[in-house]
Amino acid sequence: MKVKLILHRSYGDIELEGESFDELIDRLKEFPEWLEVIDSIISSQSTVVSEKDILSGIVQITSEGPVLTVSRDKLTDREAVALLLYSMDPKGLRPRELSRLLSLSGFLSVGFASRLSELKREGLTYREGDVYKLTVAGKNWVEKTVKTIKYGGTPVE
């Protein structure tokens, strides 16, 4: 009996097949590594809209690095983490550097590592070595979030 699993990603569907559930499970164990490779390739090839235009009024690039200029009451910790990752695309950020930038921005969050884990679990970030980066879906989410912050209410498409 053939077993098939279809995973829906922002850039298309990924199909995994096996002759049995055990074979499919074995393939799934290898899959997170492949998913990071796929997301990395897609991310590096995607056309990036000028970050200066998108992040103007929300993130300011300083000599210390990107700093959030939006007040803490307008952003969740998850959004703050994702915005800083977006501002450092395609380089990404190490957790220690992310913590420093959050502090500079007035987002003193001891739980930011948990937010990184949540974003990774939801497919919005991935880890490459010791650096975190946004996936294509993560970049899309940040862009919608920015529109919500700038224009209020629901994001403008």
Image (cartoon, rainbow, N blue to C red):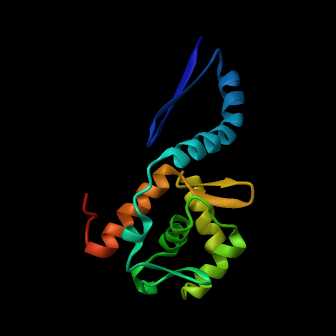
Residue at image position (54%, 85%) is 105
Residue 12 in the image, given as x and y percentages of width and height? 44, 35
Disc count in the image? 0
Indicate the quadrant where residue 17 lies.
top right
Residue 48 in the image, given as x and y percentages of width and height? 44, 55
Residue at image position (72%, 74%) is 96
Residue 61 in the image, given as x and y percentages of width and height? 52, 79
Left or right side of 38 for 138? left
Q: Let me know if residue 90 appears in the view.
A: yes
Residue nearest the viewer, comparing 45 with 81? 45
Residue nearest the viewer, comparing 125 with 117? 125
Q: Quadrant of the C terminus?
A: bottom left
Q: Let me know if residue 110 appears in the view.
A: no
Q: Residue furthest right?
A: 129
Residue nearest the viewer, comparing 63 with 29? 63
Residue at image position (58%, 61%) is 118
Indicate the quadrant where residue 5 lies.
top right
Q: Is residue 44 above or below residue 22?
A: below
Residue 66 in the image, given as x and y percentages of width and height? 55, 78
Q: Quadrant of the N terminus?
A: top right
Q: Residue furthest top?
A: 1
Left or right side of 45 for 101? right
Left or right side of 23 for 53? left
